[in-house]
Image (tube, rainbow, N blue to C red):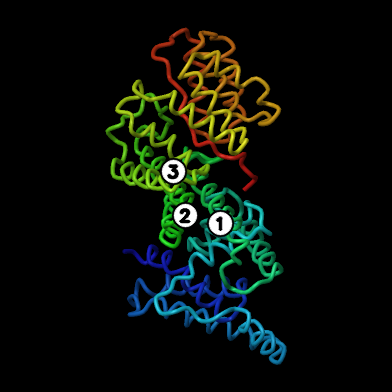
Amino acid sequence: MTTEDLLRQLAPRALGVVARRYGDFADAEDAVQEALLAAATTWPTDGCPDNPLAWLVRVAGRRMANTYRAEDARRRREDLAASWSLAGPEPLPGEDDTLVVMFMCCHPALAASSAIPLTLRAVGGLSTREIARAFLVPEATMAQRISRAKSRVKAAGGGFALPAPGERAERLRSVLHVLYLIFNEGYATSSGPDLGRSDLSCEAVRLARIAYAALPGDPEVAGLLALMLLTEARRPARTDDRGELVPLSDQDRALWDRRLIAEGVALVTAAWQRGQVGEYQLQAGIAAVHDQADAYEGTDWCRILALYDLLEAMTGNPMVTLNRAVAAAMCKEPGAGLAILDGLSERLGDHHRLHAVRAHLLELAGDREPAISEFKVAARLTSNVREQHYLTTKAAQLGADRPGLVDQPECTLPEPAREDL
């Protein structure tokens, strides 16, 4: 295991210990970040300490003590004593506070655009520079965003502990939603030169595994992990040697990761048996139908359509409706899908995916000129360079009167409308 991998695993545990001990999440997060930086600098040359977690906690604690000494001693001692009484007992030996840290990072006082970078830094162990680079913003901008997020968490109050039982279900939804958004951004970036960012999607999978290990009996936690694994399994076939998008119909399924598929199918099957089906389980079910088909032509589109019907009734999400239109076109005929798209612009606005799906369905229906126009609009609206290339090429191929094989649209994750990251 590399030093970087070890630090990412230890980051939330160290933060949990320091935050619990001192009762201040914001200051503890700063202190742990400094400890992680010190470890990344010294461990590769001096060697990893015998107890790396204790080393991080000790260095972070020293930083916290220096901070307190620099301020009014009496006030800080009083505040600290009060916070200790609220923070709860020290964790038992071997106890992992990662889930508590996740709940704090995904506090309901935070918008997703703030919770995502805070989660990546506090739980994922990514530096501010890495997060800024992932979302294509200046490091100073991301630092301010993370600082404001910590201030909001601090202002919201409450000790370092799991939410009260009455709040836990809603807070868990926030945690799962943030992990879902991180995965989506990694699997299909909202902008930039690459189709996806495997570092973000893999980090989302790692964090989802942590959540599942802490809450193995929650079917939606299992459903989200299954969805990620079943989707991530297709990544090796999703781009060609030049990094260009390969639609689902043309992917070499021999490249799909069968180990991840088997794990994902087992997870979602066990989750369904608990009888509490939720949106992540339904999405995982859709991904499982795709992954278990031996060939694109053998995809059970009518089963996918039935699952999308349930998912749309459950969520009312317009992105789900968009993907349901694809399933309806494939299960029935293109006109059925196009009919579902009518009026969807009122809910999705001028979203490039709406134009892209309409273009594909018009192509299937044989309406070449309108399809070309829609492909061009979609290419102009997307900020992802690889998607632009794919959509522009589709328009050019149709315009050159060389239809060749019909490319079906990849049935993307039914994700919520993206927030401005």
Q: Give the Cα distance between marks 1 and 3.
A: 17 Å
Instruction: Report the disc number at residue 227.
Output: 3
Q: Nearer the viewer, residue 325 or 59?
A: 325
Q: Earlier in the sequence, mark 2 or mark 3?
A: 2
Q: At 61% from the left edge and 54% from the top edge, which residue is drawn?
A: 138
Element assignment for label 3? helix
Q: If you read the primary sequence from the N terminus, does the residue marked by circle 1 or circle 3 appear first? A: 1
Of the numbered discs 1 and 2, the one sitting upstream in the chain is 1
Residue on which disc 1 sits? 172
Task: Point out the residue furthest to the front here.
Answer: 275
- Are the residues tagged 1 and 2 within 8 Å (C-beta)? yes
Q: Is residue 260 left or right of residue 166?
A: left
Closer to the observer: label 1 or label 2? Answer: 2
Q: In x, y percent, where is residue 11? A: 47, 68
The residue depicted at 48 percent of the width and 38 percent of the height is: 283
Looking at the image, residue 318 lies above or below residue 83: above
Q: Is residue 89 above or below residue 384?
A: below
> As shown in the figure, which amino acid type bears the numbered disc 2?
Asp
Q: Residues within 10 Å of mark 2 (few under 14, many from 20)?
A: some
Tell me: residue 264, above or below residue 352.
Answer: below
Residue type marked 3:
Leu
Q: Which residue is mark 2?
A: 218
Q: Secondary structure beneath disc 1?
A: helix
Dot 2 falls on a residue whose secondary structure is loop
Side of 296 relative to 144 (left or right): left
Q: Position of residue 343 (x, y in %)?
A: 68, 22
